[in-house]
Image (cartoon, rainbow, N blue to C red):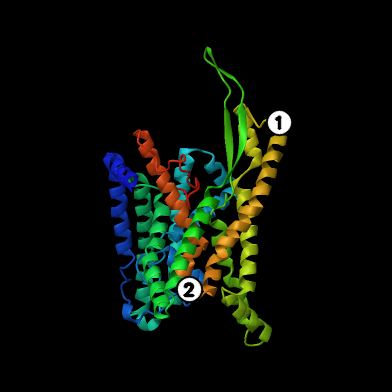
């Protein structure tokens, strides 16, 4: 306890770090206030469950901290910006123009950021209109519907752009990656309510001991997620001696870190986005076919084994896909060769590329299986009678984002401590973050 207090004192004594933490807190407060400001023209007393029990909408509501179900001006949160950023990244693989911008350094990055912002406005306007038309009940609208939809879309676009701006300011003047932090705060904001709701549910049934066991299980699941996030396969890389000026620089041995979970939360997000398709398609034919009706009911139940089996297969497939587009063994081999580095026992060039690709294949499969396991933990938790909100913290996108963002933020704080010659946060060694935020800026 004494070491913990000393660490907090050391953190607070670093002026720049203290100012960044205070700036982050102020930005978080502004964001949370915005998530409770209801859109003009809506009677909040007539709003019911806007997610309708839908898994995808429920996920969105969790990521924006309940702003979706509150029908607030930040109902879509930062998610349209993330969708636009992912689209730009994928376009970089398909179109030469975007690929060229990605290689132009700072000027190319500024152009891509500008394109991403314009695309964010278009995505927000489209999603905002769909959100207003499909989720807001007409009896909750207190003004002319045409005026409501027009003003509502403008307010949602403004709310998303405000959230994006707050994220950028947090990255610049606060601590951690701003976009990731805003998503994390939205998730964390629902955790106290989930704990209280689960405690009341178990307490009313006389199952306090079972609630304690749930907290212990949650702690173990978090430890497992941290271990999986930080697991790295290190490939030794030897650099030859180089002549710099009149001096001979001795060759150094470094490591090429390949993370077990390179793709992060993206496979879960993609898989979750596609899981509504089977039930949606089957429901179109449910009135004419008993089989279609059965399929619709099966894939609407997130605890059914059929739903979870398909979910696992999608996550594994997307993990391999996202790893393939994120890591290019040929480029790694070329960069290593140009820098005078080589893997001991492996020839430079194509053999090095094949070696790295082989290692990637070996670690991607167990990483995908573990990621799929974390993704279905909430469904398993629901089978034990946990409330839906509390069960969502046992895995899936929420848990991985929480773990990843916290590790990244602690790593940045530790860097400040070590720079000022204080002790780090961990006695056993340097703290390692994800090194791959939810979305880069």
In this picture, residue 228 sits left or right of residue 73: right
> What element does badge 2 sit on?
loop
How many badges with numbers are in the image? 2
Residue 10 image point, x, y percent = 30, 41
Looking at marks 1 and 2 on the same chain, the residue that comes earlier in the sequence is marked by 1
For discs 1 and 2, the disc positioned in front in the rendered view: 2
> What element does badge 1 sit on?
loop
Separation (CA) of disc 1 from disc 2:
53 Å
Seen from the viewer's position, the closer of residues 79 and 175 is 175
Query: Relative to residue 148, is residue 368 depicted above or below?
Result: above
Q: Residues within 10 Å of mark 1 (few under 14, many from 20)?
A: few
Asked whether residue 60 is in view, the answer is: no
Residue 365 image point, x, y percent = 66, 53
Instruction: Provide the residue designation for mark 2.
Output: 386
Quadrant of the image occupied by residue 47: bottom left
- Residue 259's tag is none
Seen from the viewer's position, the closer of residues 268 and 370 is 370
Please identify the residue farthest to the top as the structure is shown. Answer: 246
Q: Residue at x 50, y 76 (%)?
A: 385
Q: Residue at x 57, y 74 (%)?
A: 303
Asked whether residue 427 is in view, the answer is: yes
In this picture, residue 104 sits left or right of residue 325: left
Residue 9 image point, x, y percent = 28, 43
Instruction: Provide the residue designation for mark 1.
Output: 345
Seen from the viewer's position, the closer of residues 398 and 425 is 425
Residue 95 image point, x, y percent = 60, 49
Q: Residues within 10 Å of mark 2 (few under 14, many from 20)?
A: many
Pointer 1 with pointer 2, Cβ within 8 A: no
Q: Residue at x 66, y 32 (%)?
A: 343
């Amino acid at each position: 306890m004494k070491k913990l207090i000393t660490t907090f004192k050391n953190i607070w004594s670093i002026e720049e770090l203290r100012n960044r933490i205070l700036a982050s807190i102020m930005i978080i407060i502004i964001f949370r206030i915005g998530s409770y400001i209801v859109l003009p023209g809506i009677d909040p007393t007539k709003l019911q469950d806007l997610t309708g029990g839908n898994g995808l909408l429920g996920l969105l509501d969790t990521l924006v901290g309940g702003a979706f179900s509150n029908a607030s001006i930040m109902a879509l949160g930062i998610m349209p910006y993330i969708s636009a950023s992912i689209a730009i990244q994928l376009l970089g693989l398909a179109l030469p123009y975007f690929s060229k911008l990605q290689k132009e350094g700072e000027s190319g990055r500024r152009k891509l950021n500008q394109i991403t912002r314009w695309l964010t406005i278009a995505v927000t306007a489209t999603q905002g209109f769909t959100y207003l038309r499909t989720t807001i009940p007409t009896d909750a609208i207190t003004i002319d519907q045409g005026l409501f939809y027009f003003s509502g879309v403008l307010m949602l676009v403004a709310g998303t752009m405000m959230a994006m701006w707050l994220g950028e300011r947090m990255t610049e003047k606060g601590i951690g990656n701003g976009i990731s932090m805003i998503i994390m705060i939205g998730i964390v904001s629902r955790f106290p309510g989930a704990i209280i709701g689960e405690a009341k549910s178990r307490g009313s049934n006389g199952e306090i001991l079972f609630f304690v066991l749930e907290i212990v299980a949650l702690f173990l699941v978090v430890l497992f997620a941290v271990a999986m996030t930080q697991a790295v396969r290190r490939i030794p890389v030897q650099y030859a001696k180089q002549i710099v000026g009149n001096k001979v620089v001795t060759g150094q041995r470094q490591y090429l870190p390949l993370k077990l979970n390179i793709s992060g939360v993206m496979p879960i997000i993609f898989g979750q986005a596609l899981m509504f398709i089977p039930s949606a398609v089957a429901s179109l034919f449910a009135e004419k076919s008993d089989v279609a009706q059965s399929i619709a009911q099966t894939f609407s139940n997130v605890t059914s084994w059929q739903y979870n089996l398909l979910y696992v297969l999608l996550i594994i497939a997307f993990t391999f896909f996202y790893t393939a587009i994120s890591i290019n063994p040929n480029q790694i081999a070329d960069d290593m060769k140009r820098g005078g580095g080589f893997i001991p026992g492996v020839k430079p060039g194509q053999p090095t590329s094949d070696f790295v690709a082989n290692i990637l294949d070996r670690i991607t499969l167990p990483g995908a299986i573990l990621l799929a396991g974390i993704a279905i933990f909430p469904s398993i938790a629901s089978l034990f009678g946990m409330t839906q909100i509390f069960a969502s913290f046992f895995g899936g996108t929420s848990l991985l984002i929480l773990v990843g963002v916290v590790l990244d933020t602690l790593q940045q704080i530790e860097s400040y401590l070590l720079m000022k010659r204080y002790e780090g946060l961990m006695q056993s060694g340097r703290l390692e973050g994800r090194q791959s935020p939810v979305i880069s800026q």
